[in-house]
Image (cartoon, rainbow, N blue to C red):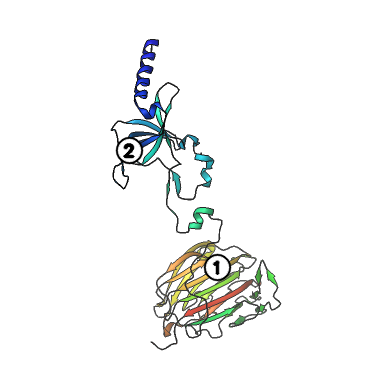
Amino acid sequence: MSMRQAITRADEVERFLTSQPSFAAREATLLKVISSTDIGVGGYRYLYTVRLAVVGSTASYVPQEDEAVNMEAISVSELSNVVLTGYSYGVPLADLPGGFLPVAIPNGTYVQGVPHRRSDGSFLWLIVNTQAITGTCSDNPLADVVGSDHITWTEPTIAWRFKPQKRVWLCTDCTTADDYTTNVSGTGAAVTFNDAFIHSNYHVGIANCTTGTTTSGRACVVTPTFDCLQLGSGAVVLEMMIRTPSTLSDATNRYNVIAGLHDNIASGATAVDGVYFAYRDNLNSGKWQAVTFSTTTGSTTTADTGTTVAASTWYCLRVEVNAAATEAKFYIDEALVATITTNIPSGSSDQTGITVGIRKGLGTTARNMYVDYVDFTQDFTRCAAS
């Protein structure tokens, strides 16, 4: 470009600017955003197309376009954005609430703009605004603010306040047997309750279940009667905290850990009339297995929980059966790991009980399993219909 051409161009721009009062005085004016183009390469900066606007004449002050002439503009807030790391006024990307990101000023938005000169002599509008943000709040508003570092509250399936006319509750914290008893078989087999309140890893009160040295030795915490519960007449929750033996089951000293609802303690294989967790080294590749069995159907349903059993490990095992006994949910450490809807025992022909324990199947070396607590509740009503 020649010197003459440059002077001519500058004169034309200057004459245009001085013909517009807002430009001449460098005053702010009302603009309408028509469109935007991303120019930030991930930094959330946009080049806007804008038009002059005025406030409408009606009492509602509806703005309207003053001239249908397209001009360029940028946002003063977006000038502070740093590619992929921070946004206007020094807000780091990591500090934005979950689910939210900066966006362009939406089309049709009316903004305030001030004219500014570029380094090449041309002019554009500088929009005065804060950073535009969009996003969706999660179901837990606290998570949007503090992320995952907070206590998660889940509404319990069953209210735990005990009302004898509406609920049965059988529990033990294993300082004593409380509402339960024990079942043992074999030389040296025993269940010892820690009535001195000695604790391990914050587990106060522990029942030590040892199989003894008999090949089929067993030791369990159980309900006093094996067939004392009937599913299908109210929602059921059974939660147990157990610790696995220090040595996993193997081909030399094989054992079953069975925890849940069932009524066949002596069985070395499937426990009948049951909704329970089972572990054995050659069962489900050594992972916890969810099991239901109904005498009426004579069939078993199993589900892989995906959780490999580790030695000397505390597990919180939870079984929930809905009121109609048509769905059983299995939880490990408060995470849902399996749901079964078939072969759930219910009614008087499939009555069941509670058993939490260990049974040997091979070998003569004693194995010890520990129980911290067993908590069972069932909703029903003894009240006459109103």
Camera-near label (2 vs 1) is 2
* Residue 288 in picture, x, y percent from top left: 52, 66
Quarter-wise, where is residue 189 in the image? bottom right
Mark 2: which secondary structure? strand
* Residue 268 in picture, x, y percent from top left: 54, 75
Going by the image, does 318 lie left or right of 191? left
Q: Is residue 44 above or below residue 179?
A: above
Quarter-wise, where is residue 211 in the image? bottom right
Question: Who is closer to the viewer here, 242 or 197?
Answer: 197
Q: Residues within 10 Å of mark 1 (few under 14, many from 20)?
A: many
Going by the image, does 107 lie left or right of 266? left
The quarter of the picture where the N terminus appears is top left
Q: Residue at x 41, y 83 (%)?
A: 347
Q: Which amino acid type corresponds to the residue marked 1 in the rendered image?
A: Arg
Mark 1: which secondary structure? loop
Q: Which residue carries the number 2 mark?
A: 54
Asked if disc 2 and disc 1 are in contact, CB closer than 8 Å, the reply is no
Question: Who is closer to the viewer here, 124 or 340?
Answer: 124
Q: Which amino acid type corresponds to the residue marked 2 in the rendered image?
A: Val
Residue 249 appears in the figure: no
* Residue 370 in picture, x, y percent from top left: 63, 72
Residue 29 appears in the figure: yes
Mark 2 or mark 1: name the one nearer the start of the chain: 2
Q: Which residue carries the number 1 mark?
A: 280
Q: Residue at x 68, y 71 (%)?
A: 199
